[in-house]
Amino acid sequence: MNTNLSPATWVFRVNRACRLGQGPQLAWGRILRGVVGSGLCLAVSTSLTGCSTLTQPINGIPAHRISPDFFPEAKNDLVPVDIALLSLEPPRDYQLGPDDILGVYIEGVLPFNPPNEPPQPPPVNFPQENSTLPPSIGYPIAVQDDGTLALPLIEPLKVEGFTLEQVRDKIREAYIENDILREEKARPIVTIIQERTYDVIVVREDAGGVTGSRNAGGETLRGSDRSASGGLVKLPAYKNDILHALVETGGLPGLNAKNEIRVLRASEADKRKRADFLRDYWAGQRAAMADPCYCGPDLPEDPSVLRIPLRIRPGVIPNISEDDITLQDGDIVYIENRDTEVFYTGGLLPGGEFQLPRDYDLDVIGAMALAGKGIGASQNNRNGNGLMSSVGQVPPGMLYILRKTPCNGQIAIEVDLAKATNDPRSRPLVQPGDILVLQYKCEEELLNFAQGTFFTYGIRELFNN
């Protein structure tokens, strides 16, 4: 008997046998013989190739045999860092420094008052918009870069680090000692008109334009087109810290940003340190790079760049000093986008690119659900041949994680979905750059083929006739 007949041919012969009076038993027998014969052919093909010729297997390593070095660290238990650590504690009394603008009034001296004329009242100065300072009185005089205050008829006074009350006493003593004012007339008024500010640059990639790739359903995946917001921010003294810089530019980093803040110092010493670091690294790699088989390590972290994490392990106190969070003129606060933290899907999963959650773990079962196909869902879409994976109700049970390794290598991690459903240890966490490929096991293809051939074609055509 020829067992390589198509299902339609089997149905035709059954119908003909029934019409000739040979009985349904003979028809059923021929159907079963045809199914068994085709199943044997498929089994032989499977035994020779290791799987069906329509789905090539991936040579994977079971997840429980993989070294822990290939798996990302869990982040479900991370907690937000105390944002108070990112802010300076202001002193009880404001301490003066260069670029502070003071309001000074000295009766008879500032302004000069001719004899026998009534003294002029001091001018009133209202604060600038968004300033928290109260209105002040006096003539504006700035503290010089060397920390001194220049006043008429006396030598410049050193006022850097002093409070307003202390400066008032120094001015009074100076004019009395120089016989310019009598003790009862030396009653200077010193207020602050404008605090000194620090010009800080904030670059934020977490609030840029939303474009990028989309998944199979047309949903936007990428969080940013790498455009950045922010700009130049003027921070008053004792508010020149990281927290105030973030508040002035939109608040704490959003979910599109990495869980860290980077600070690049503008001082020449730090710039030279960064340049020397890169020069030394590439000088050490240049000789080895001449070998075409050489694969050097990734570029290490720049020691001159301050990195402040936004989420940490419970009970861990980050080593953040006051100098770390204090910003000076020209410093750069950089919030980097995390649009590279994505994974990809293929095989029997809907193809697409999906962004990983920032603050919690995502295992392979969650990743499949995110891609639109949970465990246990059958594959009803036809493949290019219209066979095997297009029929039957047995869901695919093998998932492969294609993970990059150093030097452009790759490791295939094999995940048995039946085991993964019952054992959380068999559900690896997905990490950026992973490619998830869903496939049938060989026995699943055989069962689907048998179900599709026998039930879909044979039984339906038999009862239709």
Image (cartoon, grey):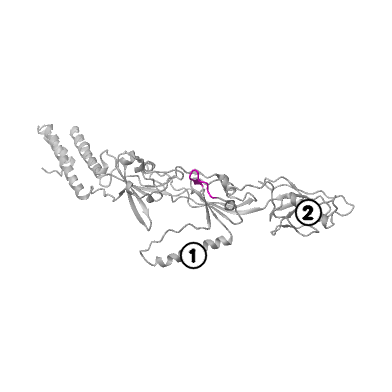
Viewer-closest of 249 and 280: 280
Picture coordinates of residue 150 (x, y %)? 75, 58
Q: Magenta stretch: residue 318 in it?
A: yes
Viewer-closest of 38 and 168: 168
Q: Quadrant of residue 10?
A: top left
Left or right: residue 134 compared with residue 321: right
Element at label 2: helix
Viewer-closest of 296 and 408: 296
Residue ID for mark 1: 279
Looking at the image, which residue is at 34% across and 52% down?
411
**Dominant secondary structure of the magenta stretch?**
loop
Q: In which quarter of the image is residue 99?
A: bottom right
Q: Residue 171, which numbered label?
A: 2
Looking at the image, which residue is at 35% across and 56% down?
409
Q: Magenta stretch: residue 208 in it?
A: no
Left or right: residue 288 compared with residue 166: left
Looking at the image, which residue is at 58% across and 45% down?
84
Write the start and end of the magenta stretch as one range: 310-319
Q: Quadrant of the N terminus?
A: top left
Looking at the image, which residue is at 25% across and 39% down?
392
Q: Quadrant of the C terminus?
A: top left
Q: In which quarter of the image is residue 423?
A: top left
Kindly indicate whether the residue at mark 2 contacts the one at mark 1 (C-beta within 8 angstroms): no
Q: Residues within 10 Å of mark 1 (few under 14, many from 20)?
A: few
Picture coordinates of residue 218 (x, y %)? 41, 44
Q: Residue 272, relative to residue 6: is it above or below?
A: below
Amino acid carrying label 2: it is: Ile
Amino acid carrying label 1: it is: Arg
Q: Residue 229, relative to residue 453: is it above or below?
A: below
